[in-house]
Amino acid sequence: MSDKAADLSEFEAQMRRNGPMCSIATIREQLTADQKRNLDAAFGSEAIYASVIARVLGNWGHRVKADTVNRHRRGECACSR
């Protein structure tokens, strides 16, 4: 047996979480690099309301509710599992 630890990253990448994926995470996968950067900055700013983030995401073609944005901000979504 080898002393080298096994690399399980390929297996872990294929595992699915229990429950649905977070809507915000799903949307982020479809954004451009600039949009992701701007979205991350908006999430980090207390001055930007969840309703504004939801509206901008809608303008970008992704329907999401402000409640979903707030849940993601609080870490109560599937991302934090």
Image (tube, rainbow, N blue to C red):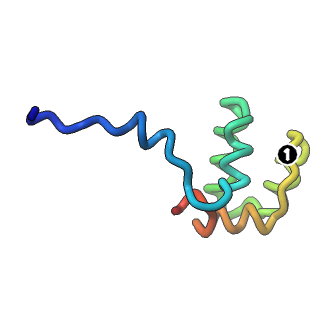
Image height of 41 relative to 7, above or below: below
> Which amino acid is tagged 1?
His
Please give the name of the residue rendered at 24% of the width and 37% of the height, measured from the top-left corner.
6
Left or right, residue 17 beside residue 34? left
Q: Nearer the viewer, residue 58 or 81?
A: 81
Image height of 30 relative to 74, above or below: above
Q: Which part of the image, by quadrant, shows the N terminus? A: top left
Image height of 30 relative to 17, above or below: above
Pinpoint residue 37: horizontal percent, then vertical percent.
Answer: 64, 38
Please, what secondary structure does the residue beneath circle 1 have?
loop
Which class describes the residues within 10 Å of circle 1: few (<14), some (14-19), or many (20+)?
some
Q: Quadrant of residue 65?
A: bottom right
Please give the name of the residue rendered at 38% of the width and 37% of the height, measured from the top-left corner.
9
Pinpoint residue 74: horizontal percent, then vertical percent.
Answer: 61, 69
Looking at the image, which residue sits at the far front? 1
Please give the name of the residue rendered at 90% of the width and 43% of the height, measured from the top-left corner.
59
Q: Quadrant of residue 77?
A: bottom right
Residue bearing the label numbered 1: 62
How many numbered marks appear?
Answer: 1
Left or right, residue 63 beside residue 26? right
Q: Nearer the viewer, residue 69 or 15?
A: 15
Q: Nearer the viewer, residue 25 or 4?
A: 4
Pinpoint residue 7: horizontal percent, then vertical percent.
Answer: 29, 35
Please give the name of the residue rendered at 48% of the width and 39% of the height, measured from the top-left corner.
13
Pinpoint residue 36: horizontal percent, then vertical percent.
Answer: 67, 39
